Image (tube, helix red, strand yellow):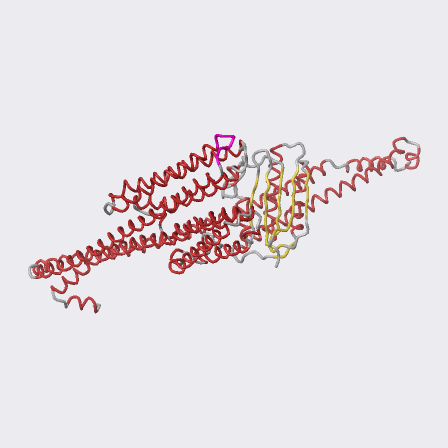
Amino acid sequence: MHPLKTWFRNLKVSQKLMLITVFFVMPDSLMFYFFITGMNANIRFAELEKMGNEYQRPLERLLQLIPEHRALAGHASRGDAALAGELQTMEHQIDAAFDALEAVDARIGPALQFTEEGLAKRQRQQFRVETLRADWEALRTVLLDLAPAERAARHLRLVAGLRTMITHAGDNSNLILDPDLDSYYVMDATLLALPATQDRLAAVMDHAETDLQQDVISTQERQQLAVHAALLQESDLDRIRGSLQTALNEDGNFYGVSATLQERLPAALAEFTAAAEAIIGLTRRLASEETVHLTAAEYRATGQLAREASFRLWTVAAEELDRLLDARIHNYKNRRTRSMIVAGLALLAALGFVSFITRSISGPLRRQAAELRAANETLQAEIAERIRAEEKLASVHRELLESSRKAGMAEVATGVLHNVGNVLNSVNVAASLALEKLRNSKVEGLAKATVLLAEHERDLGAFMTSDPQGQRLPRYLQRLSSHLLAENAAVRAELEQLGRNIEHIKEIVSMQQSYARVTGVLEDVPAERLIEDALQLNTASFSRHGIAIERSYTPVPPVRVDRHKVLQILINLLRNAKHAVEDAHPPAPRIGITVEHAANRVRIAVADNGVGIAAAHLTSIFRHGFTTKKNGHGFGLHSGANAAREMGGSLTAASHGPGLGATFTLELPIAS
């Protein structure tokens, strides 16, 4: 008996009950653990949001100062010496903002993935605090020496970098995933809408100031101002008002109404709305009037009021977002504390209950023990039955493996018979041609000439010189001998072709017999020789049907293959191409063969201008048993593709559709 089972049996009933209670409590304990873990995750989630909000503060400050610095630098570069001191003061403010950004980056940057690895994951490697500050220092050094366009471009790159860092902070601080409607819509304003508005206001102010340097604003410029006004109204102001109003409406549905949110946010929003509507109104006025009745200074002052109001609104919204997040964290912590107290009380109650029932269930436990023994015996019987079922399943599995092996052997045999059939067709053609030449032989003319000479044996001289028939006989014998020599050469060529075909059948059968013993022998063979051998076996058929063979061979290294398998594949491809051309009846039937080097393989392509292949069939054409020919078996291409894979190559098909021909590509590994 197992020592653990012996130990359990020796326990008292109260101890067993206590142990059982522990096991029953374990699932609840796990659930409680996951609950607390979830609470901690929610707290961490909100704390990370606060980090993102904190990281954005110096970025917002820089987003406010950089465009203002650009405008001041533009005026200073035009000789306004009074602005030099103001420009220097603003540069000190920007330095202070960068100092604040570096401090917050050192403290919470790694948590927000402001590291080389974290930024690289989102392809933002260049948006490090150090890189941005270095760009600022480089700009300040040559500020007044730069051309206006270059100075503007550098300021815009800084602003783009700040916007990207705000986006990165939002992506990695969970701000963008905020789960509560009130804080979510405040986040939408602080993280997305307000930075976009502030950036757009700066761009619109620069654009309008340039236009106001002229007496008349062109139609194109007025159209652009109209677009800016529409974007400021619809994409910026309406969105900000909608988001913050939704946050105010939803505030009481989560962790109680935030008094400061309800008090501060409407006032800041109203101030921003008034300032934004003023600049939007001026922009629309410029867009509608061809003659300018407004100075650049007046427009910039109105725009500056709108930007300053937007940053004050951002500050209020960011502070209120922190308060909402603090309320959420406080709520989660209170729930966690209450849950732990309730769990402790529940555990004490469970222990008291176990102590109570221990004294009253000894008898029922004995009956339950008997029932458990009976259940155990039933379980043992079921286990034995399962073992028998598994043994039977193993036997069936072995039978299936044997059936699969036999099916594979049958498939190989089918492929070989198909290849033998291909060669037998060539044998039949060669034998038929030889027989036809023998039937049409002129050898009977020789026999007639011999009889004629025998009849005039006694007067042969006179017959050859005086008789007209005798006079024609030498020329007739000369022409007959030439014809018989040509006829003999043609029959001998057909018989030699017949011999080669029979030899190839012997090789196919020999290769099939070798499947039961060893795998095919790989040889280093020139690809051109394999192709020419395959063409030779089909030459008579191609000639009979008037099919032109076009060769395009480029120098390639030898291939390491089983020569007989490759020959079977090529013969099958050539016969399929011949049948496709015959069925299509093109004006100039042709089969093209190309050989080229492709990486570590040699690529052999067999192309025809035959009937082509439908797109739906291209994915099925190499499947066993699939064929589009009336008398086809669906074995040749299947076995060819398998043989190519076995040799480390591939066989693929391509066609532009029915009637447009097809190309079969055989790739074979080159010799090492």
Q: Quadrant of the N terminus?
A: bottom left
* Front-most of residues 646 and 79: 79
- Secondary structure mostly seen in magenta is loop
Taking the image as drawn, is residue 651 in sight? no
Left of 498 or right of it: where is 408? Answer: left
* Front-most of residues 635 and 308: 308
* Front-most of residues 513 and 294: 294
Q: Residue at x 45, y 33 (%)?
A: 284
Q: Is residue 291 magenta?
A: yes
- The spot of residue 346 in percent (x, y) is 15, 57
- The spot of residue 579 in percent (x, y) is 60, 37
- The spot of residue 469 in percent (x, y) is 87, 31
* Front-most of residues 226 and 580: 226
Quadrant hosting residue 283? top left
What span is in magenta?
A: 287-294
- The spot of residue 362 in percent (x, y) is 8, 61
Q: Is residue 128 magenta?
A: no
Q: Residue at x 17, y 63 (%)?
A: 19
Left of 505 or right of it: where is 38? Answer: left
169 over 485 or under it: above or below: below
* Residue at the limit of the structure toward the front, as seen here: 82
